[in-house]
Amino acid sequence: SSSKQDWLPWSLLLLLLTCDSHAFYVPGVAPINFHQNDPVEIKAVKLTSSRTQLPYEYYSLPFCQPSKITYKAENLGEVLRGDRIVNTPFQVLMNSEKKCEVLCGQSNKPVILTVEQSRLVAERITEDYYVHLIADNLPVATRLELYSSRDGDDKKKEKDVQFEHGYRLGFTDVNKIYLHNHLSFILYYHREDLEEDQEHTYRVVRFEVIPQSIRLEDIKADEKSSCTLPEGTSSSPQEIDPTKENQLYFTYSVHWEESDIKWASRWDTYLTMSDVQIHWFSIINSVVVVFFLSGILSMIIIRTLRKDIANYNKEDDIEDTMEESGWKLVHGDVFRPPQYPMILSSLLGSGIQLFCMILIVIFVAMLGMLSPSSRGALMTTACFLFMFMGVFGGFSAGRLYRTLKGHRWKKGAFCTATLYPGVVFGICFVLNCFIWGKHSSGAVPFPTMVALLCMWFGISLPLVYLGYYFGFRKQPYDNPVRTNQIPRQIPEQRWYMNRFVGILMAGILPFGAMFIELFFIFSAIWENQFYYLFGFLFLVFIILVVSCSQISIVMVYFQLCAEDYRWWWRNFLVSGGSAFYVLVYAIFYFVNKLDIVEFIPSLLYFGYTALMVLSFWLLTGTIGFYAAYMFVRKIYAAVKID
């Protein structure tokens, strides 16, 4: 098998190079071939709404149930997303049409919804819930046809086809509530080319639905549970009155069409975002801006530094050097350990852990291994990687703690392993209690929570300790100058050297570089879109790292020139300045883009936003801190100090 492992990466690389980027498909997901009249299982995933942000299980509403309900075993990511994949009573056979079929019970007895059930259904419809089904792992989509007249010419009306994920549970019209009780499934198959004398096999390549609301009186059902729908548009919709019992039929029809979409590119319809142009534009824009600024900053810094170092290293004018100012003056204090070195090194350790995790996740996703077709893979990978990256986090934290003259390494390691994950776990636990109270499937079940705790204390904690032990034993970072016994006085600082002003100034550039990408990530999280543009994200991430490092170096240079040598904490805070802008943007997004009105959804939004902002601050702060630390060590190594 070793030879197999040797050729696997190369074959992947070949695939990447040879395939059209759209057709490149996930390794490890094999297509299923169906013969004529094979059953195609339709499963339900969940109900979602971007107004309440609370997913619910499919059978939380009184839909028709099969004789035996079986849930699919799920991975960690699916559980955390609130997916509860379950079988449904729809009978769909490959390439066989169904005109109309009644779903529940006997054909001549309609389903009766009790007052309680009717009220629940009505409430979910008014909250804009969508139902998500899957057939052969493809999510159902509703086709939206938007007529757009281009070039101001009304004669050439073009149809813009867009897809919505899932289908609407129902609709409201003049204070009346209607339920979509008839589903017309349209499935597309691709016929596989075969040798002679073999039966044709088919693959499902698209799954669409047209939901309709048809009232009880207009559906004629016979004994064999088949039915006839009213012709034309004469029928009226099925109303749900939340104050009394309602009678209705749940019906469905199945229509098959041949399609020339290959199995490998069957996800394209779900991922066609019409905004790829915006993406390229924004990325080129931010790359240009960042390189332009980088160039300017690097030139200024290098020129000023050369001048500084040349001046400082001139030994002849001893009289002049008496009235020195600038960063050389603080050489005896610049490496003086800050307050709370343990907390600083712990936060930076968590920052390194996050950085490694995000880098690997984005890189692997960019290769197409975590596409949306493997549900929950992204979340699962991220969780496990964060646990395993504890080694690197612990190592860097331990080494830094030793450099800052810390002694209690065991306490430091414990702090590194529990500080940031503890905050995350605490916030998530509190939010989870609220979701539990709402009986939503988005609540993490108790066993999963215990499993996560076990992962944290069984994998992450020991690994952090291991890394910390080796980091603490390693030679500390060598500082090029000795620290004086007595700290020097810090002169009065100008107003623009204030911490908050620094945060505002330093945050603009990195935030500007990733601003557009943020919009897509937010809509993926809060509006049930698919996010798959990891190639773009990788570029943006690299731009972010470069711009954070540079801003941080500039800020620390200004600070040392102002003879303020307390740069450790300040630089960590200021480098994470873009997190403040992310917070402002999240508030703007909440007010403008989402119509969330209730208390609990708002709480969820701001709770998760707080977590994102905190993680982002740790990430950018860490990048900036290490850049600044390397810079400070470089410049003080370059001047001669008596």
Image (cartoon, rainbow, N blue to C red):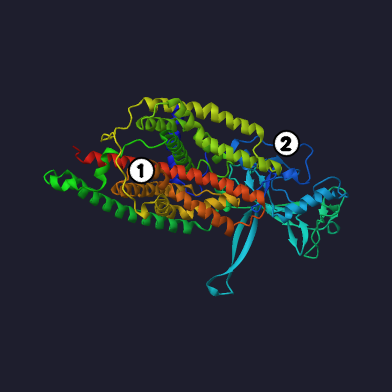
Compared with 430, 126 (above or below) is: below
- Which one is nearer the viewer's eye here, 83 or 386? 386
Kindly identify the amino acid type of the residue bearing the numbered disc 1: Trp
Residue to which mark 1 is pinned = 567
Q: Left or right of 165: which side holds 546?
A: left
Q: Which mark is residue 542?
A: none
For the C terminus, which image quadrant?
Answer: top left
- The residue carrying pointer 2 sits among few (fewer than 14), some (14 to 19) or many (20 or more) residues within 10 Å by Cα, namely few
**Quarter holding residue 46:** top right
* Corner quadrant of residue 372: top right
Q: Position of residue 190 (x, y in %)?
A: 61, 48
Farthest residue in the left direction? Answer: 316
Q: Nearer the viewer, residue 235 or 79?
A: 79
Total numbered circles: 2
Report which residue position mark 2 lands on. Answer: 70
Q: Amino acid at mark 2?
A: Thr
Report if residue 370 is visible in the image: yes
Instruction: Report if residue 30 is visible in the image.
Output: no
**Residue 161 spot, x, y in % from top left:** 60, 60
Q: CA distance from mark 1 to mark 2?
A: 59 Å
Nearer to me, 319 or 541:
319
Secondary structure at badge 1 equals: loop
Residue 133 appears left or right of 20: right
Q: Earlier in the sequence, mark 1 or mark 2?
A: 2
Q: Residue at x 48, y 29 (%)?
A: 414
Q: Is residue 521 left or right of residue 329?
A: right
Task: Determine whether the residue tagged by mark 2 lies in a helix, strand or loop.
Answer: loop
x and y percentages locating residue 311 in the rendered image: 18, 47
Above or below, 521 relative to 370:
below
